[in-house]
Image (cartoon, helix red, strand yellow):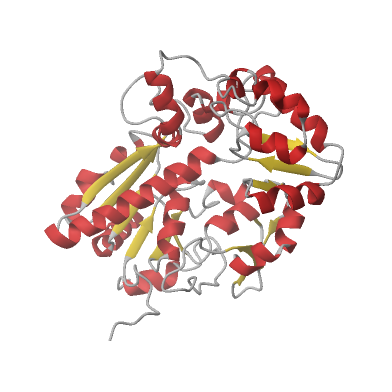
Amino acid sequence: MADDTALPLDGLLVVDMSQFLSGPYASLRLMDLGARVIKIERPDGGDLSRRLYLSDTEIGGDSTIFHAINRNKESFAIDLKNADDLATLRQLLLRADIVIQNFRPGVIERLGLDYAAVSALNPRIVYGSITGYGDDGPWVKRPGQDLLAQARSGVMWLNGDETQGPVPFGLAIADMLAGAALAQGLLAALVRRGTTGRGSHVETSLLEALVDFQFEVLSTHLNDGRRPPKRSAFRSAHAYLAAPYGVYPTADGYLAIAMTPIPKLADLLRLDALAPYRDDPPSWFTARDEIKAIIAEALARNTTEHWLAILEPADVWCARVLQWPELLESDGFTALDMLQRVSRSDGVEILTTRSPLRVNGARPPLSRAAPRIGEHSAAIRAELGQ
């Protein structure tokens, strides 16, 4: 009988030579699916994200973001400029199923750890690479950093109101999307290896991930005369969607309303002012600022709960806009069981998120905190017979 408690990637070894966010996010997903992840770090300082502080909070000498993205991984301190250490790393790569790197183009080749070199050692290796902008073109040597990738991708012109200029996302979306895309590609390459016995080189970049992120609206742009996106100047939420789509202030908070026919909303909110737009669907886009202003004025007169009691029974797609404290205290969030406390032997512990995936009805029971620099070096060397 199959073991339903075993995770899909149990028994697979991932050697993660990446740092910051994109590569480590990919290996985080693989770890949550059961893979053993050995993180290669410099002995003097480790992954640079250990000091990438989002606030003045640090735990065990490292940033919270390092802890969040490197939980349950092992740290192997390797000096890539040391010939003996490089030889040790190559020994480890002989045993690996997957290797991940996000060095700038050209660096990995100088180290002799590019796909051609590693696959010569281990033909079954599945090799993942993330760059900022690919391997060719005028941007190759530019810093592959999230905000800069957002700036070059066009995505900033989809956020905020029309009068605001470009508005970046408040998250490192290029890093996270590239990491997620790489994880998908690596898993597909593992499937192929299962049928052919050969590894593959899976590549993506921050820019490619952001272009893919915009596939729906970018495809519209490419096929409608290449008109630029036109954001609403009032309560904008999507450059390509008509009123009432947006977020509106109420007497005590905010209410999000998604796609809803204007006649239905006019009747429910008793808004005679929407009469000129009822039977003119094109105006729901061309006059969306005027329509949204009418809706906003009405919604501001009463509480969020008042409007939810009217709209939700009528199957209007709407939701209260929650801040983190409200989310964390909500029954809907509690039911998902998405938080966990992870710890390690030196007493360091951190409350963080869990895998977004459930396998056979359960989330992976992985509770080890992110490692200290080189915490597992001695044990790994012993495995290698050193």
**302 versus 365 height, above or below:** above
Quadrant in the rendering for residue 273: top right
Q: Name the residue at 77% across, 46% down.
A: 307
Please, which residue is most extreme toward the left here?
A: 196
Quadrant in the rendering for residue 347: bottom right
Q: Name the residue at 38% across, 72% down.
A: 7
Q: Is residue 175 left or right of residue 249?
A: left
**265 versus 338 height, above or below:** above
Quadrant in the rendering for residue 132: top left
Judging depth in this view, the residue of 101 and 280 nearest the camera is: 280
Q: Is residue 119 left or right of residue 244?
A: left
* Horizontal and vertical percent position of residue 6: 37, 77
Judging depth in this view, the residue of 17 and 184 nearest the camera is: 184
**23 versus 159 height, above or below:** below
For residue 1, say whether it is visible. Answer: yes
Q: Name the residue at 84% across, 46% down.
A: 303
- How many marks overall? 0
* Horizontal and vertical percent position of residue 104: 40, 35
Judging depth in this view, the residue of 123 and 331 nearest the camera is: 331
For residue 141, say whether it is visible. Answer: no
**64 versus 154 height, above or below:** below
* Horizontal and vertical percent position of residue 333: 65, 62
Q: Is residue 241 left or right of residue 94?
A: right
Judging depth in this view, the residue of 209 and 149 nearest the camera is: 209
Q: Quadrant of the N terminus?
A: bottom left
* Horizontal and vertical percent position of residue 263: 65, 33
Q: Is residue 164 left or right of residue 77?
A: right
Q: Quadrant of the C terminus?
A: bottom left
Q: Name the residue at 73% across, 43% down.
A: 255
